[in-house]
Image: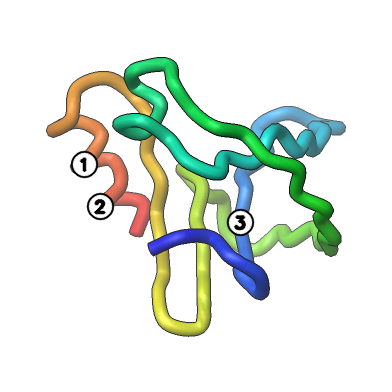
Amino acid sequence: VEVASGSTIYLPVSVPGGFLYLGDAPAAMGHGELSATGLEMAAPTVITVDIGRESPLIGVRGETADFLMAEATAGAYRRVFAEGRRAA
């Protein structure tokens, strides 16, 4: 599942006055950038930012027309997988 046009991304903010930064756009990655290789591309982007105060998130979440996504990035594979499942 990939984030694409029309996706909704939910980002937790853990500090007052937090900022939003958009980084590079990967055109291709080698092993999920674990091997420190990737091909970047220009990506003209239009975003809409809403501040939601419903329930606190413990991680990044994504939503497309067909899928709900939870992202976890920390430590060993089993721990990351468990963290992602808790966030979903």
- Residue lying at the far left in this picture: please name it: 78
Q: Would you name the residue on which mark 2 appears?
A: 85
Proximity of marks 2 and 1: CB atoms separated by less than 8 Å: yes
Give the left or right position of residue 71, taking residue 24 as reference: left
What residue lies at 41% left-to-right and 46% top-to-bottom?
71
Give the secondary structure at mark 3.
Answer: strand
The image's mark for residue 45 is none
Q: Is residue 86 left or right of residue 77?
A: right
Q: In the rendered structure, are the residues bearing label 3 and label 1 in contact, judged by CB atoms less than 8 Å apart?
A: no
Q: Residue at x 50, y 56 (%)?
A: 61
- Amino acid identity at mark 3: Tyr
Q: Residues within 10 Å of mark 3 (few under 14, many from 20)?
A: some
Image position, residue 84 (x, y; %): 30, 47
Question: Which disc number belongs to residue 81?
Answer: 1
Residue sitting farthest toward the top: 36
Residue 5, image x, y percentages: 66, 70
Side (left or right) of 10 relative to 64: right
Q: Which mark is residue 10?
A: 3
Badge 1: how crowded within 10 Å, few (<14), some, or many (20+)?
Answer: some
Distance (Cα) linking label 3 and label 1: 19 Å
The colour mode here is rainbow
Q: Assess disc 2: are there few (<14), some (14-19) or many (≥20) residues with their C-alpha within 10 Å of its C-alpha.
A: few
Image location (x, y in percent) of residue 69 = 41, 61
Q: Is residue 80 left or right of residue 27?
A: left
Image quadrant where one finds the C terminus:
bottom left
**Which amino acid type corresponds to the residue marked 1 in the rendered image?**
Phe
Residue at 57% from the left image edge and 59% from the top image edge: 55
Lower sequence index among marks 3 and 1: 3
Q: CA distance from mark 2 to mark 1?
A: 6 Å
Q: The residue under label 2 is which amino acid type?
A: Arg
For residue 82, what is the image quadrant?
Answer: top left
